[in-house]
Image (cartoon, rainbow, N blue to C red):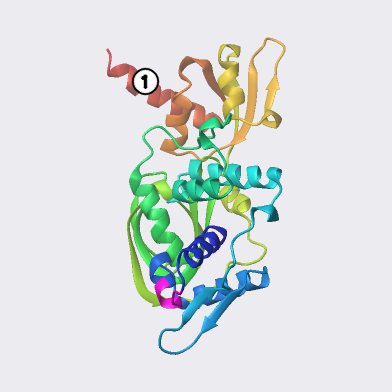
Amino acid sequence: MQIDRLIQILFLLLSHENITARQLAAELCVSTRTIYRDINILSIAGIPILSQKGYGGGLSLLQGYSLDKSYFTQAEQDNIVRALQVLKSSNYPDADKLLNKVAGLFSHNLQSEWLEIDFSYWGSPEKERNNISALERAVINKYVITFTYFNSELTRTAQTVEPLKLIFKSHAWYLIAHSQRKNEIRTYKMSRIRDIQITGQLFDRELPADFSLTPAYKEEYNTPLFILHFSEKIAYKVYDEFQEKYIKKLDDGTLEVTFRYRLSDWTFLYLLSFGEYVEIIEPVEAREMLKEKAQKILSLYA
């Protein structure tokens, strides 16, 4: 993430009298081209960075320069710290280290925080953070990557893609990438990615300006239309799981939910998690399929 890297570069410049672009690139796992682009951004922002060529040369800050906390109001400092807390909660690698550094710079007492934000699921794996670090490097430097992917049907496929963007949405990380096999932009859920390998192959493709994650997500789950009836006994869970615009309360208290699902094992496992408190009204095909699965479950206890 660029803002993360810009702050790290600034701290490295503050802690070194002189450092080369190559050293910065090695420290941050990016290319020297990326470092020079970031240095230019910092310079435009008013940070006095000096560049000296030749033996003993490198990058340095103007002598006597220090980061003036007065650039930020107290409210702005609090917002920066809270933004980093959200980044940390999203399982982003090394965000905790950056949070501690910035909090120290602003003399911000993290122990007195009244708010804790945690997007992670129970047992969130360390491997996901490592995958994010590898993908960040690949996206920034435009390296083609390979990995093994498990779709919602648990089908395992080998993927070769051009990684374009990482998105955190609805409690999970997603990779937006161009699939070389499908020759189209695809969305991959991070928790289903295994064995990431960064190749030495570069690509030039950019993510289209009009790209949106929402249409790609809807397309996958576009048909058919389900009408579900939930018991009011689990109204709390229904409102947790579905947006209010999809829920209609009937005269007898039943909650009718209209939503689109694929006829997949994932869909039926999800609906079965509601137990006796959900009934499929439509489509009839899905109703019969769930009935068959329920009978198989019952036979295990006969």
Neighbourhood count class around disc 1 (C-alpha, 10 Å): few under 14, some 14–19, many 20 upward: few
Q: Residue at x 57, y 11 (%)?
A: 233
Is residue 222 visible to us here? Answer: no
Q: Position of residue 169 (x, y in %)?
A: 56, 45
| Amino acid type assigned to the residue bearing label 1 in the image | Gln
Q: Residue at x 49, y 44 (%)?
A: 88
Nearer-the-camera pick, 196 or 107: 107
Residue at x 41% of width, y 77% of height: 22
All told, the count of numbered labels is: 1
Name the outermost residue toward the front: 64
Which residue lies most toward the bottom here? 54
Task: Out of 3 and 269, give the one closest to the viewer.
Answer: 3
Side (left or right) of 195 relative to 262: left
Left or right relative to 68: residue 167: left
Magenta region includes residue 104: no
Residue visible at 53% across and 77% down? 36
- Decide whether residue 22 is among the magenta residues: yes
Judge whether 297 appears above or below 185 on screen: above
- Circle 1 is placed at which residue position? 295
The image shows residue 165, relative to residue 93, as above or below, that is below
Please name whichever residue, 185 or 107, is drawn nearer the observer in this view of the structure.
107
**Relative to 90, residue 298 above or below:** above
From the top left corner, tell me how far across and down residue 290 is, in percent: 45, 27
Residue 287 visible, this orientation = yes
Where does the image place residue 266, in percent across and percent down from the top left? 43, 37
Q: Position of residue 107 (x, y in %)?
A: 57, 44
> Relative to 4, does residue 97 appear above or below in the rendering?
above
Instruction: Name the foreground residue: 288 vs 160.
Output: 160
SS at circle 1: helix
| Bounds of the magenta segment | 18-23
Of the 4 image quadrants, the one containing the C terminus is top left
